Amino acid sequence: MITAHHWIDALGLEAHVEGGYFRRTFQADHRPRTKTPAGERYTLTSIHYLLTHWSPVGHWHLNRSDILHFHHHGEPITYHLLHPDGRYTSAVLGQDTGQGQVLTLAVLGGVWKASHLTSGDHALISEAVAPGFDYADMTLGRPDELVTRFPAHADLIHRYCRPTHG
């Protein structure tokens, strides 16, 4: 049986600030960088990303870049999306298309995103980011700010915001 620990060891994954584990797998070093309002970025980057039963949540965060998510192994992941116009949508990334799961999910830059392991031991995905990922382009969700902006979704926001200490 392939477990979360297998993927962490086999892929050399490290803890991610938003939750789960990751490792960058590609950056487009062979192409000129893309100019963005925040500075130059790789045209494309990608990562492996793993949620586990002990780290099952990708906490609320916002990216400037567009991200494609691809499900590879394990259980489905539920995504919660808060759009700039206040709309809420959700999707389940997984292998069971007969149950409405999708193999690939696109999340546009500027959309707040939280995800969680739907059940089981783990879920392994990849993400492709364009323009390429830079930590300067990611904002971790703060419950007070998100609830002010999206008051109708306060319960969901509090459920999946990164815990604060102190």
Image (tube, rainbow, N blue to C red):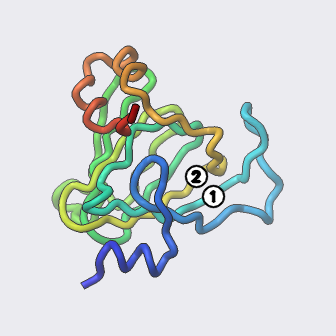
In the picture provided, is 93 more to the left or to the right than 99?
A: right
Task: Tell me if mark 1 has few (under 14), some (14-19) or many (20+) residues whose alpha carbon lies within 10 angstroms of its own.
Answer: many
Q: Residue 108 at x, y = what percent?
A: 50, 39
Instruction: Name the residue carrying label 1.
Output: 45
In the picture provided, is 21 more to the left or to the right than 93?
A: right
Q: Earlier in the sequence, mark 2 or mark 1?
A: 1
> In which quarter of the view is residue 147 placed?
top left
Frontmost residue, 131 versus 143: 143
Which amino acid type corresponds to the residue marked 1 in the rendered image?
Answer: Thr
Residue at left offset 38%, top offset 20%: 144
- In terms of secondary structure, where does tag 2 sit? strand
In the picture provided, is 18 more to the left or to the right than 65?
A: left
Which amino acid type corresponds to the residue marked 2 in the rendered image?
Answer: Val
> In which quarter of the view is residue 32 placed?
bottom right
Q: Which quarter of the figure is the C terminus placed in?
A: top left
Q: Residue 35 at x, y = what percent?
A: 78, 40
Residue at left offset 25%, top offset 31%: 156
**Which mark is drawn over residue 129?**
2
Q: Residue 50 at x, y = what percent?
A: 39, 63
> In which quarter of the view is residue 119 placed?
bottom left
| Residue 46 to residue 34: above or below | below
Residue at left offset 40%, top offset 76%: 7
Q: Residue 37 at x, y = what percent?
A: 73, 31
